[in-house]
Image (cartoon, helix red, strand yellow):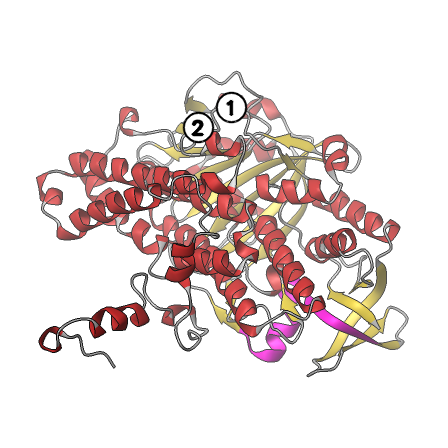
Amino acid sequence: MSGLLIMGSGVVGNFAAAYFRRYFPTLRVTVVGRSDQELPIVGESLVELSTRFLQDLGLSRTLIEQHLPKYGLTYYYKLDPSRPRDPGYIVDEAPSNPPFPSFLINRFSFDAELRCLNRQRGVRCVEGKVTEVSLGKGAPHRVTVQRADGREESLEARWLVDATGRRRLLARQMGLHSRAPHQRSAFWFRLVDFDPSILDRIHALKKVNWAYDSYYCTHHFFGKGNWVWLIPVRSEDSRRMISIGLTYRPDLFPGEVTTTREFMDWMAQEHPLVGDFVKSGQIVDTNVYRNYMYRAKRRYSSRGWFLIGDAADTVDPLYSTGLALASLSIQQVGAMVRRDLEGKLSEAYVEDLDRAYAGVHNTASDMVGTLYEVMEDGFQCHLRMNLSISTMFHLAIPLILNGYYTDSVGARLAARFGGPTGMIRQLGRFDPLIARAAGRLSPASPQHFIKVQSSSTLNFPYFEYHRDEDIPRSISRMFRHMTAMRLRLLRLAGMRSWIDPVQLGALVRTLLSAGAVACFGRRSLKNSRLIRWMVAPGPGRRPRDASATRPAGLPKAWIRRIADRLPASRRLHLP
């Protein structure tokens, strides 16, 4: 019997296998899947979190020697939405080398390297397809595998991880999936033997950059309900190669793109220079995803089964967070397996981690989903992105780096921020204010644009040490940034906005939040007795549905304690 069995031999499944071989060296790890299966591959752009995860697994030299460096993300915004063919762009890129490295990887060669490494480290690789899964109750899970030669084999395991990607083996079997709001579709291909100098013809309004070669970034061009990516990679034979793709919201995008001709027709309308760039090279392969967004109602179980990667939830590739979120879920599974080995795993702990992951995933997904509504408007798009990126780098990433998503108290705190009454609501209140300011400025001029990726927005000072005790200051800076942004927008939007009770209330809340978090000084939030008290669950566990979670604020148990101390004439009557 295997200790841990991973269904799926893609990149996420092999990430998990490498992680468990490193941190659970006595555990027998088995990966079941077809390594020769040709499936659409996306995810060439790593971010700091996924790179750090791979470095921790001992893959630093592989990344440096076999793949390209990545110097952040570069955004190309249209200055005037009424002139989509205008070759001019407001260009925003990282101000300097990011504090953590990241890479542009060729997924075909990288996936093969990772599988080879796992075999060398003792991972058992079973070539075949899972045809049946029987989940045990107090007994091992059983998996039936059909080998390439037609033979069937039965495998047992104490823990079962579903990394089957879009096949979603366990989730389909158990009815765990729901469609996500704001569907997306994508068309992409790889290009070789192109002329890179064509990109130098872009009419770019940007700060002069001497820190790095701007070619080695992920390039994002925004348009009507869509965006286009260009990701340089190194081909298997060391030729120059680039991944190019279009992601769009079908309900906003005027048409459908499933062929190269349709892609080129659309580029001629919105980004003619990108079309010229494609014409200069040779297309290697093409891929299509239609309406591919979904999310899981549940990812983890105390019975020892887990969903990770696309087997649980899909992500929009805008911020290249797919592999970063997969690495987070793998670390959470590792924490649950460790507790199970120690005899300390509880359903409450599993639910806390599940809610925390759902919060960060759904918040990021919903923020990007609504962004498509203004992508053609550079002014609105860049301001919304500034706020989203600031939230990621001041809140989500510091919490992840310091183990909050694998700690009971930390996970509950993260779930509060990621819940429906958390940051997604606070950021959503900016949208009508940004739209009002854009209406008064239409069309906006370059001086109205701010830096989306400044050292302040990317929280560079925090990441020098990224200590747990510095998180309160980081979160306080985020709220102060939101306060300054709202004041700026109120000035741009005019007098009517100053008497808007929603905006004034949001302004007061962010000011109070900045001050309240700053009061923690240099103390760990997850180890604070006050935070433990604030996030402690009530008498009964909360419902699993994230939409039914308790709103942020005083728990009902606290209000009862206060009410009991009031005179009878002023007592609150609670159900």
**Figure quadrant of the N terminus:** bottom right
Q: Quadrant of residue 394?
A: top left
Q: Which residue is mark 1?
A: 96
> Residue at horizontal 54%, vertical 57%?
407
In the rendered image, is residue 157 in sight?
A: yes
Which label was assigned to residue 149? none
Q: Nearer the viewer, residue 145 or 85?
A: 145
What amino acid is found at the position of numbered circle 2 in the picture? Ser
What amino acid is found at the position of numbered circle 1 in the picture? Ser
Region rendered in magenta: 155-176
Q: Is residue 252 left or right of residue 561?
A: right
**Figure quadrant of the C terminus:** bottom left
Question: Number of numbered discs present?
Answer: 2
Which label was assigned to residue 455? 2
> Residue at horizontal 41%, vertical 54%?
369
In the rendered image, is residue 419 in sight?
A: no
Q: From what the image shows, is residue 112 above or below residue 278?
A: below
Which is more N-terminal, label 2 or label 1?
A: 1
In terms of secondary structure, where does tag 1 sit?
loop
